[in-house]
Image (cartoon, grey):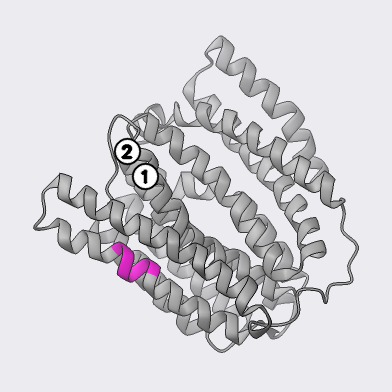
Amino acid sequence: MNRLFTILIFVGVPFVIAGAIFHWGDIPMFFLCSVTIIALAGVMGRATESLAIVSGPRIGGLLNATFGNAVELIISIFTLKAGMIGIVLASLTGSVLGNLLLVLGLSFFAGGVKFKRQNFSIQDARYNSGLLIFAVIVAFVIPEIFSMTLDRPKTLSLSIGISVILITLYLAGLFFKLVTHRGVFGASDHEETETPEWTKGKSILILLLSTVAVAFVSEQLVHTFETLGEKFGWSELFIGIIIVAIVGNAAEHFSAITMAIKNKMDISVEIAVGSTLQVAMFVAPVLVLISLFMPEPMPLVFTIPELVAMITATFLVINVSNDGESNWFEGLMLFAAYLIMGIGFFLL
């Protein structure tokens, strides 16, 4: 798999450049860009896995989520630039649903097939549960409720205020978890004895180069969305929630499942849930602020189906993970919930 990703990168990136220069069709460019981004995400996953061994499971999981979300952030910025606000909001919804139901579900399932029962930090699970309720339910629902009686400028002002609060709280949460209360959450960050595949310097260099490549390929990908919707009859909602979210979060998908198979559930859960929190409390508000410099600002207002789906996913994951244990059936249940929601958004 690792060799395949490397081959796809060395073939995919030059072909994307050639396609951009010679104006290839949107449909072949979509598939070419998607495969290339997934391959780049796989390499980014290997680099962050090496950093996780050096830095510990918690910081490693945070790094994986951060660089994984960097892919989606880049795609979303170019999508905002193209004026496709609906796709950006849908991709944020897709990230929340994908990480909580698809990634965590497949991680629980893949790890549970190999190990009868797997354990992860109860303290981390309970801490993340509180933040999930705040980020998804409080921060996402409030703008929708108030937008029913506010005009667009006031709704945008509310979104900006909430975005600043979310970013501040997210950074404070990192300081709380990694500095002031570092020893309270789970096991020591230096218990890993595995040898990393790459050195720290090589891993960081690969992450930086991959991020630059993703930025270029993502811009080409965004140009294909309009034709994609017309060709296959897909709505902006479906493209954002399913297509963009899966492609943009491929790094977390790959790494979290790999960690679960290796029985490293603390890292796996940290990647999936930590990525969700980062999307809700950092990526989404950052995009709101960035949109102020775009042709059309983006208020933090989701549709009712998106909100209901995210709230349902949040409570389901909290209920399943609060005991600090997982098995294959719980993973299958989360994955089934993702499929049900996917069908609903496809038909919507």
Q: Can you tell which quarter of the image residue 269 is in?
A: bottom right
The magenta span reads 135-140
Establish if 239 lies above or below 127. above
Q: Nearer the viewer, residue 98 or 136?
A: 136
Q: Residues within 10 Å of mark 2 (few under 14, many from 20)?
A: some
In this view, the residue farthest toward the front is 180
Residue found 33% across the figure and 46% down from its top: 237
Type of secondary structure dominating the magenta stretch = helix
Q: Residues within 10 Å of mark 1 (few under 14, many from 20)?
A: some
Alpha-carbon distance for marks 2 and 1? 6 Å
Q: Can you tell which quarter of the image residue 137 is in?
A: bottom left
The mark found on residue 138 in the picture is: none
Residue 177 location, x and y as percent?
59, 74
Q: Which residue type carries mark 2?
A: Leu
Q: Which residue type carries mark 1?
A: Leu
Q: Is residue 137 shown in magenta?
A: yes
The mark found on residue 289 in the picture is: 1
Residue 337 location, x and y as percent?
43, 69
Q: Secondary structure at mark 1?
A: helix
Q: Nearer the viewer, residue 330 or 183?
A: 183
The mark found on residue 292 in the picture is: 2
Residue found 11% across the figure and 49% down from its top: 151
How many numbered circles does the render carry? 2
Residue 163 location, x and y as percent?
35, 55
Residue found 76% across the figure and 52% down from its top: 46
Q: Secondary structure at mark 2?
A: loop
Left or right of residue 182: residue 5: right
Q: Can you tell which quarter of the image residue 18 is in?
A: top right
Q: Nearer the viewer, residue 211 or 16?
A: 211
